[in-house]
Amino acid sequence: MGELGGGTPVSATLSKAAGSGAAEKLSRIAADVRPSDLDGLVLDYGGGTVEVRSDLALELDELAELFLPFMSVERLAAGSGAVPERDFAVVSVEAADVETLVTELHASSEPHSLYDGLPGWIARLSDEEVAIFRREHPQWIVLLRPSETSVTVLRSEAGHDRTLGEHLAKEPLKMAARSHGLVSLHAAACSFGGAGVLLAGPKRSGKTTLLMHLLGGGAAYVGNDAVRLDLRPDGRVGLKPWPHMIRLDDKTILGNDLLRAARLIERASAGDSNLTRGPDGKLELYYPTLAQGTGQERPEERATLEAILLPEFDEAWQGAVETEPIEDEDELRRTFEAELREDHSIRWLPAFDFESTGAKDAEGLERLLADPPPAFRVRYGPDSSGVAESIRALLRRAES
């Protein structure tokens, strides 16, 4: 995968190097890890392949559950060799003295924003290797050589972090998808009988709330906050699902018949491990949990883009949903350029050439905007009655 290892070495941008003691200890620990002795997974999405090995069965089970609805997932038994032509490898093991090593590394580290806005730290171990680590519980250290295509994760005894394994696998898969022509976009999407609807707009514009109303009205789920555009040779645009956490506030849940019937709030209060509260109080869940309410085992994978919606949610809105055609191509361009910036804003794993992949996404966006499908502004409020039927009517008019 050409994008891996193509960027400026991050070690050159760090002002201080870690103490030789910590660096040597980490090198010795990493050298003793034998990935082939561990069970694992092979994740394949859009032609990109990531091999994950772990000494923790729970970690592999969680990753398999998360990724299986979206891509090919194959189990690997301990003793099997490395996966040929893989794009990236992740090895996760429990290690002694992680807490002590984190303390030693911190003295020569710099702040480093992780995925989902988590605070982290980064330290230069050598000219070729960096350590990214988390001081707060659960503690872990990621050893990374930006010029190579693998990372080693060292976990403390209580250092299992479900989201770490998820994001370590997703970053290379995201880059692989781009290298195979899929455009990465911060947006939501659903489909009605294969007719795809893309929901775009800034944060808090109502994309997720509108998506949930459409699912309640019979639409099939494609993605929330993360979608891949497949720009086909025939000029059509396919919508591809992408694994991503779904975050819902209580108002959205209580105002939606489908979500309310799934008793998500009650289950979270009862300690359901698949439903957690984020720092902002929103309920966080993954697709398999949502699928229990929708009855849709897998996201829709064959939707073709037929309409673009720009939601505008207004808490004070009392009337029926309103739709208005968008004729201004500059407005669409500004919206999608902002969505690309949002998707590219997370660069926590310094092993990729973000400039070239960003250019590919921008090129794909130009192709989309050269002949866009019908676009509409959708104004709506807490009363969701009629929303899904209004969008169905838009699609019928677009077809005719």
Image: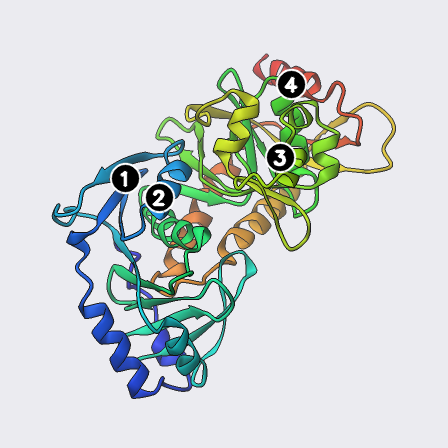
Of the two numbered discs 1 and 2 on the same chain, state the one appearing first in sequence.
Answer: 1
Front residue (pair 235, 301): 301
Using a 10 Å C-alpha cutoff, classify the residue at mark 4 as few (fewer than 14 neighbours), some (14 to 19) or many (20 or more): many
Task: Report the residue at 61% width, 13% height from top.
Answer: 396
Determine whether the residue tagged by mark 1 lies in a helix, strand or loop. loop
Q: Label 3 is placed on what type of residue?
A: Arg
- What is the spatial separation of the Cα atoms under label 2 and label 3, in whole angstroms? 35 Å
Q: In this view, does 196 lie above or below 101?
A: above
Which label was assigned to residue 47? 1
Of the two numbered discs 4 and 2 on the same chain, state the one appearing first in sequence.
Answer: 2
Is the C-beta separation of discs 1 and 3 under 8 Å? Answer: no
Residue on which the image places disc 4: 217
Residue on which the image places disc 2: 177
Q: Label 2 is placed on what type of residue?
A: Ala
Image position of 354 (left or right of 250): left
Is the C-beta separation of discs 1 and 2 under 8 Å? Answer: yes
Front residue (pair 268, 336): 268
Of the two numbered discs 2 and 3 on the same chain, state the one appearing first in sequence.
Answer: 2
Task: Report the residue at 35% width, 30% height from top.
Answer: 233
Is the C-beta separation of discs 4 and 3 under 8 Å? Answer: no
Using a 10 Å C-alpha cutoff, classify the residue at mark 3 as few (fewer than 14 neighbours), some (14 to 19) or many (20 or more): some
Using a 10 Å C-alpha cutoff, classify the residue at mark 2 as few (fewer than 14 neighbours), some (14 to 19) or many (20 or more): many
Determine whether the residue tagged by mark 4 lies in a helix, strand or loop. loop
Q: Label 1 is placed on what type of residue?
A: Gly
